[in-house]
């Protein structure tokens, strides 16, 4: 929330520096995310008095003698059409910084430093400035919008810094408001806190007005949805004169990011920022049927809002209606059919409290947001609804833009806007804090917070203001006390039963971190994606309707359709991540993500889903292939001290001849394969891409498995090459598995050739392997190796029908 220092000073006598105020706000629980000076980029600009001004022949320029005070009399060349002798204008001295503008003299293109120049042969020792060059507009300072020099007041001291004169020295605080303090979403709300922390008096804004006798006896207000609108107020104003707002109001709105529109609309926006209460003004002549009704929308009912967008509504949307039609989307935006126009003469002001969850859900579902909906979604109190209406009517009279009638209409559910009594134990308050705060400090702090404390023994009686609905019991009182008393008073001590323990990661965390580090060492980067995906992601995978991945949990109120399902596989995000990198010109890479998938036990949900830890690996690039990603899978296996087996398989989104099912000790743990050409084309992939997904829930049984290290043999290894003739459907993995099983001395089996051709039967193929035998306690002799070879050949012949190729 933006809070100008000058506006805060309207309510509190702030006698500390801007930095000290920032520190004070932080100490009482309000983080200032940013503090900046309005004219932070402007420097060395003074009030210049033009003593002489002569036109330069055959040009639009003038040669001026400008009095710059202590800087002396300077010669300045100026092309503005409103420069004249006797005028006072901002003068940027040599070395000054101002904003550089485009040729239209309106668009800012950065900050520039002023140096000595020469125009048409005449030296110029500075520059006379427009409002735009100082970062000003018509709302921030009258006359700043003119495409010429900014005219300064006649009483402006010559040579004085222009920043205090133009308000460029004002400070803006961007304050983060926590969710439990919606009462501070306003200038006055922050001012209350500033007054409390500085122990200063809080000056209340003027709320008085004098209503005239004019009544609208035939007008009525009704609320059908009292659960969504517990209080609704309307007030009739006539003899309205639409025009510009005064400079002070336009400036304050501009400093908080709102452009001035007209006096009536500006009043609603001013109250919005001042009290945190959204308001709306209806042009009375467009309210049909002499009534306003707050109700739920009917299914299919439509409204066009002020920004000319049309929305189709349902019974979850709250609307403001007249006798025939909707005139506002409650808490979000008014209707185009009742907006204030230049010829408006009668206005019906509205202030209301709407249920925060309904406004939040409607705003999100309709995709329509506003300053009002943002405030309502965080919480608006009935107290501010009442105060804001009074403030708006006072401003009507103060600005002289209308006559306040006596016609006030209000519907509420009986909730009081008066303080409520709370009694708490001082011992319990101190017990929460772990220290004893002196009673006099408790009284002082809570008095400054407008809670009228009274202490009687251990009992503390408070009058909780209606805008502090967050105050419920003694822990809340303790929080209020300590944030004003100072957290530095709390000393770190052990609880009586506390013990010092050693922190650290559990087995699962250690194992997963080990896997991540191993993959990073293999050249992969960790990615992180949302836990949600889109129904279109499942279509991307070409999954059939009965696929288990389509059995996904659907969110009741998703942010958008692309994030509407809880993910049941990590593959879609990995595919899109690889495609996204390729679109940005990154044509090679290795990515992995370790996250949860969500498998419902039943739909609709009756219990929490099964959250399964899963790892997904993706590689892409001209130099990458199936064996690259298989190697990364083996990295995971080696990290866990296990071995993966790979068998040919199928996946609807993977290449039919480059897909394998991954298993460990006979149990399926995942899959690996090349992205199919159809999916690659749909995602505009430019290089081969591969993906692997492994179920860490299944692999978790191997977490913490002891690593067995075998010393390197001091004897030479023996290597033999074999070419086996096998059936065409026999896989490399099957042969490797049988060779390892047949002989314990085999430490490596590598396929180096596959042959199919005229020298073999049509149903046969040749597979050539290099097999390494590693000795243990003694050197392997020829006869012993031959025995190993015979055993392997017999095993392969018996189990796979393999024979040695002649």
Image (cartoon, grey):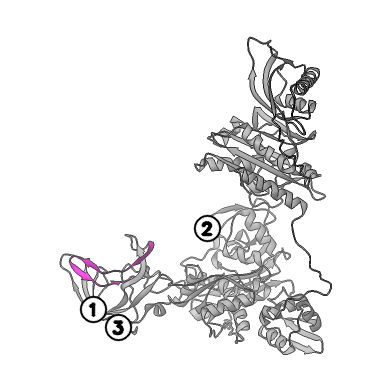
Residue picked out by circle 2: 307
Give residue 32's position: percent from left, percent from top. Answer: 57, 71
**Of the pair 721 and 324, the residue shown nearer to us:** 721
Per the image, is 112 magenta? yes
Secondary structure under badge 2?
loop
Q: Are marks 2 and 3 in contact (CB under 8 Å)?
A: no
Which tag, 2 or 3, sits closer to the chain's start? 3
Alpha-carbon distance for marks 2 and 3?
A: 52 Å
- Look at the image and give the residue range highlighted in magenta: 107-130
Q: Please, what secondary structure does the residue beneath circle 1 have? A: loop
Q: Nearer the viewer, residue 402 or 485?
A: 485
Q: Residues within 10 Å of mark 2 (few under 14, many from 20)?
A: few
- Spatial CA span between label 1 and label 3: 20 Å
Q: Is any part of residue 167 visible from this angle?
A: yes
Q: Position of residue 105 (x, y in %)?
A: 33, 63
Query: With 726 as the anchor, is 701 left or right in this view?
Result: right
């Amino acid at each position: 929330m933006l809070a100008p220092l000058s506006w805060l000073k309207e309510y509190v006598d702030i006698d500390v520096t801007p930095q000290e105020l920032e520190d004070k706000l932080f100490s009482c629980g309000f983080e200032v995310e940013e503090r900046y000076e309005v004219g932070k980029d402007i420097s060395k600009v003074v009030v210049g008095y033009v003593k002489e001004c002569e036109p330069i022949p055959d040009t639009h320029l003038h040669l001026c003698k400008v009095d710059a005070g202590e800087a002396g009399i300077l010669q300045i060349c100026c092309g503005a059409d409103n420069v004249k002798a006797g005028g006072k204008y901002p003068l940027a001295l040599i070395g000054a910084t101002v904003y550089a503008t485009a040729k239209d003299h309106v668009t800012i293109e950065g900050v520039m430093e002023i140096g000595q120049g020469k125009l048409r042969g005449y030296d110029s020792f500075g520059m006379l400035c427009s409002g735009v060059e100082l970062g000003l507009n018509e709302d921030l300072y009258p006359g700043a919008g003119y495409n010429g020099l900014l005219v300064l007041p006649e009483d402006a001291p010559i040579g004085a810094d222009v920043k205090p004169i133009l308000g460029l020295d004002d400070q803006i605080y961007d304050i983060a408001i926590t969710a439990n303090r919606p009462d501070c979403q306003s200038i006055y709300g922050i001012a209350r806190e500033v007054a409390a922390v500085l122990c200063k008096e809080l000056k209340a804004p003027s709320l008085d007005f004098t209503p005239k006798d004019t009544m609208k006896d035939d007008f009525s207000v009704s609320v059908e949805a009292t659960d969504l609108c517990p209080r609704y107020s309307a007030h009739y104003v006539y003899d309205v004169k639409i025009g510009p707002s005064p400079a002070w109001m336009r400036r304050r709105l501009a400093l908080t990011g709102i452009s001035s529109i007209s006096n009536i609309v500006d009043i609603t926006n001013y109250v919005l920022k001042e009290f945190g209460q959204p308001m709306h003004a209806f042009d009375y002549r467009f309210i049909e049927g002499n009534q306003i009704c707050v109700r739920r929308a009917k299914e299919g009912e439509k409204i066009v809002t002020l920004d000319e967008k049309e929305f189709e509504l349902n019974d979850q949307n709250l609307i403001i209606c007249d006798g025939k039609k909707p005139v506002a989307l409650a808490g979000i935006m008014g209707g185009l059919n009742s907006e204030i126009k230049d010829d408006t003469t009668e206005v019906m002001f509205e202030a209301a409290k709407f249920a925060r969850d309904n406004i939040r859900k409607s705003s999100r579902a309709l995709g329509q947001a506003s300053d009002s909906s943002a405030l309502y979604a965080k919480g608006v109190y009935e107290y501010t609804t009442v105060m804001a209406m009074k403030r708006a009517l006072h401003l009507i009279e103060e600005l002289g833009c209308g006559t306040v009638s006596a016609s006030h209409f209000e519907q509420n559910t009986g909730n009081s806007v008066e303080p409520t009594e709370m009694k708490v134990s001082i011992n319990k308050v101190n017990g929460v804090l772990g220290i004893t705060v002196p009673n006099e400090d408790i009284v002082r702090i809570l008095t400054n917070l407008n809670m009228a404390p009274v202490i009687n023994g251990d009992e503390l009686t408070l009058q909780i203001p209606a805008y502090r609905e967050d105050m419920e019991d003694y822990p809340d009182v303790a929080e209020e006390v300590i944030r004003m008393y100072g957290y530095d008073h709390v000393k770190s001590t052990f609880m009586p039963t506390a013990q010092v323990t050693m922190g650290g990661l559990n087995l699962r965390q250690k194992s997963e971190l080990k896997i991540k580090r191993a993959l990073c060492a293999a050249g992969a980067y960790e990615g992180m994606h949302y836990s949600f995906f889109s129904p279109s992601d499942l279509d991307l995978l070409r999954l059939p309707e009965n696929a288990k991945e389509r059995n996904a949990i659907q969110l009741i109120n998703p942010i958008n359709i692309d994030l509407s399902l809880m993910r049941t596989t990590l593959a879609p995000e990995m595919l899109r991540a690889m495609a996204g990198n390729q679109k940005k010109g990154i044509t090679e890479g290795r990515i992995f993500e370790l996250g949860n998938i969500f498998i419902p036990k039943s739909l609709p949900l009756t219990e929490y889903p099964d959250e399964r830890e899963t790892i997904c690996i993706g590689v892409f690039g001209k130099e990458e292939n199936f064996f690259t990603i298989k190697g990364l899978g083996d990295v995971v296996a080696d990290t866990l001290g296990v071995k993966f087996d790979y068998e040919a398989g199928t996946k609807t989104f993977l290449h039919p001849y480059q897909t394998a099912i991954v298993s460990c000790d006979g149990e399926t743990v995942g899959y690996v394969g090349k992205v199919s050409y159809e999916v690659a084309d749909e995602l505009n992939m430019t290089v081969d891409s591969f993906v692997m997904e492994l179920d860490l829930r299944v692999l978790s049984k191997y977490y913490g498995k002891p690593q067995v290290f075998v010393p390197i043999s001091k004897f030479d290894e023996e290597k033999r090459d074999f070419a086996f003739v096998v059936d065409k459907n026999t896989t490399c993995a099957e042969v490797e598995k049988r060779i390892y099983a047949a002989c314990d001395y085999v430490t490596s089996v590598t396929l180096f050739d596959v042959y199919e051709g005229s020298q073999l039967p049509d149903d046969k193929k040749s597979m050539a392997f290099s097999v390494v035998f590693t000795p243990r306690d003694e050197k392997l002799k020829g006869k012993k190796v031959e025995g190993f070879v015979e055993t392997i050949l017999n095993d392969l012949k018996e189990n796979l029908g393999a024979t040695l190729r002649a």
